[in-house]
Image (tube, rainbow, N blue to C red):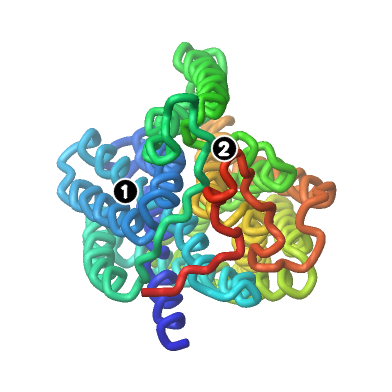
């Protein structure tokens, strides 16, 4: 029991680096704009989402094949290298390169969800997933104050020094506490003349990279559209490239599946009823959360003429209520259903975004709106993770949660570019332009609510994955059956 508590504590602390790399930088956006220009600041913010969207599919696949702990430690090390580059950056290219390396940590939250499923008994999984999401709330409380103080006192580079120190402290703790687990591969049917063991050894790395590049191209096209317009040369080229690469990826995966080679992503998993409704919900919800998080510090600093640290006092109720929302989401999913948790989350996000658009921004009123928004944010993470857990077999747990993370990153990047970018559509940022952006966020969240309301998946209490579909058995020999989806690995 104590070992499981220690594992959960380390997971919460380690996965905080994913939201912190974004939320700590938001208070520094005005400083980045002064040094590099507004367009460059947007690139610095979006680079993490772009990098994460490209790397997460491969991260999840490697975790299912090589072990979650190994991949988590490798991602953390890459993040540390990126943080060092950002802290030492003497120009925009070096800063953006560092942010791209930092994007490797984008999959940590999804990998922690998969590890929870393998370590904890199924009845505890829905609640533990809610507790694991409290890292989002902790970062929501701490990041505005910490990012604001560091930016005001020492400049934006101090934010990256802090991230570097944080991950260097957490790495040895994770190496000691997290259990090493055996991967649970689903073995594809071998092609004629090829042994099953040889087929099992092949991992379709090019396919995973192809999917990541397609996601990156889509995110680039959508991101550039807000500043350059939809008809600018690079926007249609990027979107066309994303579509073309997506078609090539699907054709490749189908061909590999027929030949007996394990594909990068099981297309049957990607198009299963649970995943094909959960992933769009993740895109829409993440777009709203990222856009509002991007807009709030700039709005408060501009309207109140205050610094980054002082603006944190206006927005900290968001993080406090997110701390409550995470465990509450796990309880709702376990006692009622993950879908109900998603409905509550999207309803609260819609109401708060609409309130930001139409209500005056005095301190008390903004505090209430932030509390409502934070509660919706906290509910959203366990709702989505439990929806995926109910849709994906244990053997593909990391792949399923990685797909969720990739869609969340895609939604976050699109939200900052499209919804947050509406702030600049009518010239300099004014209360009217912020209201327009918040109205767009409310409309997007309302669409997410409709998606959850129509969802047929996740209408029963969460089971911790025992109700997930079993992996397909394509093998000719009964002796080669894959492990049961309810098989749990004993922590080392």
The x, y position of residue 62, in whole percent, is 39, 46
Q: How many marks?
A: 2
Q: Is residue 117 above or below residue 448?
A: below
Report the side of 376 relative to 165 (left or right).
right
Q: Which residue is mark 2?
A: 266
The x, y position of residue 417, in whole percent, is 52, 36
Crowding near the residue tagged with mark 1, few <14, some 14–19, many ≥20 C-alpha atoms within 10 Å: many
Earlier residue among tags 2 and 1: 1
Q: Which residue is mark 1?
A: 102
SS of the residue at dot 1? helix
Point 19% across, 47% down: residue = 85
* View extreme (bottom): residue: 2
Label 2 or label 1, whichever lies nearer to me, is 2
Q: Is residue 355 above or below residue 314?
A: above
* Viewer-side residue, 101 vs 59: 59
Image quadrant where residue 24 sits: bottom left
For residue 312, say whether it is visible. yes
The x, y position of residue 253, in whole percent, is 53, 27
The x, y position of residue 333, in whole percent, is 72, 68
Q: Quadrant of the C terminus?
A: bottom left
* Viewer-side residue, 238 vs 312: 238
Does the residue at mark 2 contact the one at mark 1 (Cβ under 8 Å)? Answer: no
* Viewer-side residue, 57 vs 411: 57
Point 53% across, 74% down: residue = 120
């Amino acid at each position: 029991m104590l070992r499981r508590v220690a594992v959960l504590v380390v997971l919460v602390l380690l996965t905080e680096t994913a939201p912190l790399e974004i939320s700590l930088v938001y208070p520094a956006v005005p400083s980045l704009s002064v040094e590099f220009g507004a367009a460059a600041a947007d690139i610095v913010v979006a680079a993490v989402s772009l990098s994460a969207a490209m790397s997460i599919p491969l991260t999840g696949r490697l975790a299912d094949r090589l072990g979650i702990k190994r991949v988590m430690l490798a991602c953390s090390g890459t993040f540390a290298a990126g943080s060092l580059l950002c802290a030492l950056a003497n120009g925009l290219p070096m800063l953006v390169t560092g942010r791209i390396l930092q994007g490797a940590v984008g999959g940590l939250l999804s990998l922690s969800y998969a590890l929870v499923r393998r370590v904890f008994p199924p009845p505890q999984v829905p609640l533990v997933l809610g507790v694991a999401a409290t890292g989002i709330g902790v970062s929501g409380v701490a990041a505005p104050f910490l990012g604001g103080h560091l930016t005001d006192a020492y400049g934006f580079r101090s934010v990256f020094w802090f991230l570097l120190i944080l991950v260097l402290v957490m790495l040895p703790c994770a190496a000691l506490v997290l259990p090493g687990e055996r991967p649970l591969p689903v073995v594809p049917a071998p092609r004629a003349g090829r042994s099953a063991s040889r087929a099992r050894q092949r991992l379709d790395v090019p396919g995973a990279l192809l999917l990541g590049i397609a996601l990156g191209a889509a995110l680039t096209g959508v991101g550039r559209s807000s500043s350059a317009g939809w008809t600018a040369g690079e926007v249609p080229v990027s979107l066309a490239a994303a579509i073309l690469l997506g078609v090539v990826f699907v054709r490749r995966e189908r061909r590999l599946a027929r030949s007996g080679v394990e594909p990068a992503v099981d297309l049957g998993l990607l198009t299963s009823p649970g995943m094909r409704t959960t992933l769009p919900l993740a895109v829409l919800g993440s777009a709203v959360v990222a856009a509002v998080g991007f807009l709030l510090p700039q709005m408060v600093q501009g309207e109140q003429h205050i610094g980054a640290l002082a603006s944190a006092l206006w927005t900290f109720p968001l993080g406090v209520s997110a701390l409550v929302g995470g465990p509450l989401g796990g309880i709702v999913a376990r006692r009622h259903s993950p879908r109900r948790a998603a409905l509550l989350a999207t309803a609260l996000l819609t109401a708060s975004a609409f309130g930001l658009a139409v209500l005056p921004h005095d301190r008390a009123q903004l505090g209430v709106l932030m509390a409502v928004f934070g509660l919706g944010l906290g509910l959203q993470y366990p709702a989505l993770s439990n929806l995926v857990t109910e849709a994906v077999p244990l053997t593909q747990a990391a792949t399923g949660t990685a797909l969720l993370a990739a869609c969340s990153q895609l939604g976050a990047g699109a939200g900052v570019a499209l919804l947050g970018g509406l702030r600049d559509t009518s010239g300099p940022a004014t209360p009217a332009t912020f209201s327009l952006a918040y109205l767009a966020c409310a409309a997007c969240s309302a669409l997410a609510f409709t998606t959850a309301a129509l969802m047929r998946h996740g209408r029963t209490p969460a089971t911790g994955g025992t109700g997930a579909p079993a992996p397909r058995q394509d093998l000719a020999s009964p002796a080669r059956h894959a492990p049961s989806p309810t098989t749990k690995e004993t922590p080392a």
